[in-house]
Amino acid sequence: MNNFKAHLNSYNWDEVLDSIFLKTEREVEHAIASPKPTLEDFKALISPSAKPYLEQMAAKSKAITKKRFGNTMQMFAPMYLSNECQNICTYCGFSLTNKIPRRTLTDAEILKEAQFLKDKGFQHILLVTGEANKTVGVDYFVNAIRLLKPHFANISIEVQPLDQDEYELLIKEGLYAVLVYQETYHEATYKSHHPKGKKSNFDYRLETPDRLGKAGIHKIGIGALFGLEDWRADSFFTALHLKYLQKTYWKTKYSISFPRLRPFSGGLEPKVAMEDADLLQLICAYRMLDEDVELSISTREEENFRNHIVHLGITSMSAESKTNPGGYVVEPQSLEQFEISDERSTETIARMLQESNLEPIWKDWDQNW
Amino acid sequence: MEQLKIADKTFNSRLFTGTGKFSNSETMRDAILASESELVTVALKRVEVGNQKDALLSSLTHESLSLLPNTSGVRTAKEAVFAAQMAREALETNWVKVEIHPDPKYLLPDPVETLKACEELVKLGFVVMPYIQADPVLCKRLEEVGAQCVMPLGSPIGSNNGLKTRNFLEIIIEQSNVPVIVDAGIGRPSHAADAMELGADAVLVNTAIAVSPNPVSIAKAFKLAVEAGRMAFEARLAPRATQAQASSPLTRFLYE
């Protein structure tokens, strides 16, 4: 099988979902006791039957994370470069049909935002845009990376999916990682939420991690946007995707994120709600499935949840994020992609980590290789 | 106890340590000092080269400590050579621990790239300490290209599983003309003592100290275990007997 699509097609969504809901407490116990849980065990761990075992799962997840990652937390900050977008996505503040002022940062503006994040201590940054291939295409990204490379140790992007040769070009310029969330692995639901624009092509997006793996990227971030479909099934398919990628592109590192639908102006209500307890259960399940995968949490989540989750499986987090282009310095008042929940300053987050015996790691890469 | 000599340096301590996974720089420093380790490895990717106030480096300035930059994060020989050159300039040392693990999951070393990198680095005047699989042939090849020591793994890095590669470590120790430092997998002081009794010249321990609830105490325990193991090796252990040897039923006839 040379891409994930064929692999995905061998599964039936409803059957997968049913099988998760049919998992018994006994199967959960088996999964918790297993030193190397399989994808079937993972289903049990994210099933409703595992709810009474949450404390046990949290303890196990905590211990595994500590063994593999020690007492550390990788810090990163997003930098929104543009909110221009030709896609219609029903859940997104940047969607084409939303009447908001559009802005793409100029060189001088990029450097201003960069200086702010640098002064805060960030060395790992994530560049984010909508999808506007004419104005914010590969040339724009090459230019942004060239501008930022002298200032940051590690540069990642979360932008429209690109072709393999385009990724190869960006990697040569110093790109470390690409985050590309499938949003949902349910093809029909995907289509209904992405009716227009290049993003409406389910397959092209799905095969993005394959193109990245072939291009030789250092890290790929995957995930689903929780709220579009049942989070359990989408998480199973994310885990399936992870396992497929790890076997196929074994030199690449992987990261999972857990975005839940957040309110924005004119926003969408989640189809299937995901409570904090569900999210915790999922994070622990991923950690038990895979000791080494990076699990990342953003400022979408609330303060109290973040204070606790940093000990229970998460290994990477952002702080003080702005989700609008120029949001840090250039134009703080512009409209955000979504509202963040944890608005604490970087300094406060760092202190919170230190006080709970975790060392914030600002630099864990070098631009020279 | 004999001193350990690698290239032009002699060490009183046969315990080398690492700097990852600690909850803060003070704990790291206290634990490393408690271990009495004299060689401490630092991932170059964690250091802000050129920043005098780099938190990691400044907490490691101590007369008893030598820094051993490592190339963790690189995937090829070419990148490793580049990283070593950067480290030489930034940290003013020509020592380098060559770590090339293209597999980011288990961090297992790439033997082909490691051999290439070491050959090149020796030519460039480096003291190279390669982190490798416990492969006796690879160790000899590294020795041939001028590696000043070899660092075979006991079990996968961070696993705390002890000497799973024991049979191969024994062969490596038997054959090696350069110091053998068991790196990775040493999870408890008894594992460290085990490696030293086997005849390893030193061990490198990081995770087991950093992740312990009491890094300082466990660092001391490792120091004592390494000393005990080495002392036992130098004193020569009594051979292991699988059965009691009371009589000589096979040769008794000679004297009857």
Image (tube, rainbow, N blue to C red):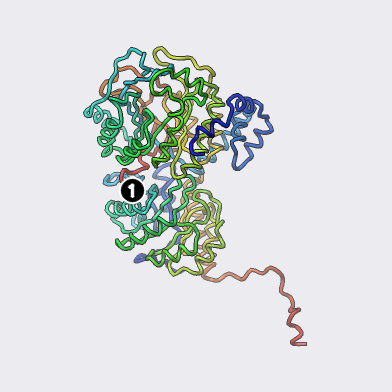
B38, above or below A221, in the image: below
| Residue beneath the point at 43% across and 29% down | A204
In the rendered image, the quadrant that contains the C terminus of chain B is bottom right
Does any portion of residue A303 appear in the rendered image? Answer: no
Mark 1 crowd level (few <14, some 14–19, many ≥20, 10 Å Cα):
some
- Residue at the extreme left of the image, as rendered: A108
Q: Nearer the viewer, residue A237 or B40?
A: A237
Q: Nearer the viewer, residue A160 or B153?
A: A160
Q: Position of residue B224 (x, y in %)?
A: 51, 59
Question: Label 1 marks which chain's residue?
Answer: B
Q: Nearer the viewer, residue A12 or A308?
A: A12
- Residue at the extreme right of the image, as rendered: B256
The tally of labels here is 1
Quadrant of the rendered image containing residue A173? top left
Q: Amino acid at mark 1?
A: Leu
Q: In the picture provided, is A104 more to the left or to the right than A344?
A: left
Q: In the picture provided, is B205 more to the left or to the right than A332?
A: right
| Residue beneath the point at 55% across and 71% down | B236
Quadrant of the rendered image containing residue B37? bottom left
B217, above or below A144, in the image: below
Does any portion of residue A251 appear in the rendered image? Answer: yes
Q: In the picture provided, is A143 more to the left or to the right than B136?
A: left
Q: Position of residue A150 (x, y in %)?
A: 26, 39
Q: Position of residue A339 (x, y in %)?
A: 40, 19
Q: Position of residue A190 (x, y in %)?
A: 48, 21
Instruction: Residue under label 1, please give it.
Output: B57
In what element is the residue under mark 1? helix
